[in-house]
């Protein structure tokens, strides 16, 4: 498919975008800052770059200007931000950004923008003017603000955070079971004495692991079965600490 460079200082966003793009068949390189982005861009010329605007060392707009001034802005660049102003979005487009994604980023918007960028990159078409997101056009910062975190884990969606450890209480198991006893289920091992939030997290973990196993790891079918949009499904699995196998199907 394509080689995509994701540049974002928040590890949670990098991992989530990587999982989504990997499932779509793309090769993904991850950079946590401008220095890493420079090195990866030089080592592996990407087909598309997803570039966050606000980063602690060198911000995305400055890096975009640098690439443009050096004559190496020869790939489509899609800017990302959860709190950009209209001036920032317009400036990035003027410099040469192909498009602008407002966080939280939906699956459909992400994949559509990537597809458009790849088509333009293959045809060599110059990027058209990009309209600022609705929240930015309203004047001032977008409504989204990343949740406070105690580590570098960030959020593509509003509730993404540190993975929750499974809260399954241990119960004594009889030494022998009757021959006709039905097999125990994970739900029978959940303790009702847990605080509500821990009990809910434990139930959701069992629930999603059940559907992942039932659907052979297909994220598309699990999303359909559970009624979640795939971006939210990825976030929920990460939040619950459920490991996602690289070999699963989409």
Image (tube, rainbow, N blue to C red):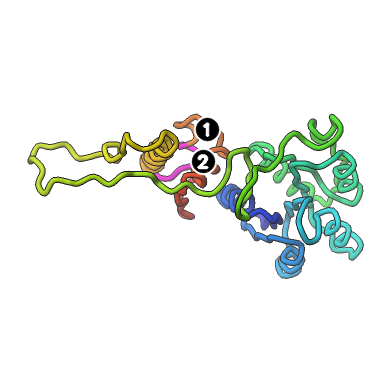
Label total for image: 2
Spot occupied by residue 202 in the image (x, y as percentages of width and height): 39, 40
Q: Can residue 1 be seen here?
A: no
Q: Can residue 117 be seen here?
A: yes
Nearer to us of marks 2 and 1 is 2
Task: State which region is magenta.
Answer: 216-222
Which secondary structure, mark 1?
loop
Asked whether 84 or 36 is in front, the reply is: 84
**Magenta-drawn stretch contains 215:** no
Whether pointer 2 and pointer 1 mark residues with C-beta atoms closer than 8 Å, the reply is: yes
Q: Is residue 132 above or below residue 43?
A: above
Residue at 59 percent across and 53 percent down: it is 15
Residue at 85 percent across and 43 percent down: it is 89
Q: Which residue is mark 2?
A: 236
Which secondary structure, mark 2?
helix
Q: Earlier in the sequence, mark 2 or mark 1?
A: 1
Spot occupied by residue 233 in the image (x, y as percentages of width and height): 52, 39
Q: Which residue is mark 1?
A: 228
Spot occupied by residue 123 in the image (x, y as percentages of width and height): 80, 50
């Amino acid at each position: 498919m394509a080689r995509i460079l994701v540049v974002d200082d928040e590890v949670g966003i990098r991992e989530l975008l990587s999982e989504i793009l990997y499932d779509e068949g793309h090769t993904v390189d991850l950079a946590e800052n401008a220095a890493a982005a420079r090195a990866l861009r030089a080592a592996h010329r990407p087909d598309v770059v997803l570039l966050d605007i606000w980063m602690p060392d060198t911000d995305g707009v400055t890096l975009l200007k640098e690439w443009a001034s050096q004559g190496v802005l020869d790939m489509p660049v899609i800017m990302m931000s959860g709190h950009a102003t209209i001036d920032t979005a317009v400036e990035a487009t003027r410099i040469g950004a192909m498009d602008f994604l407002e966080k939280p980023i939906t699956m459909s918007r992400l994949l559509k923008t990537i597809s458009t960028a790849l088509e333009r990159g293959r045809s060599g078409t110059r990027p058209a003017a990009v309209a600022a997101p609705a929240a930015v056009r309203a004047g001032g910062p977008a409504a989204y603000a990343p949740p406070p975190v105690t580590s570098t884990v960030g959020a593509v969606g509003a509730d993404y955070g540190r993975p929750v450890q499974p809260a399954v209480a241990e119960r004594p198991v009889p030494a022998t079971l009757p021959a006709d006893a039905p097999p125990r289920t994970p739900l029978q091992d959940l303790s009702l004495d847990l605080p509500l939030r821990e009990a809910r997290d434990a139930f959701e973990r069992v629930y999603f692991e059940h559907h992942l196993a039932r659907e052979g790891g297909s994220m598309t079918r699990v999303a359909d079965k559970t009624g979640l949009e795939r971006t939210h499904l990825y976030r929920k699995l990460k939040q619950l600490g459920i490991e996602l196998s690289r070999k699963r199907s989409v």
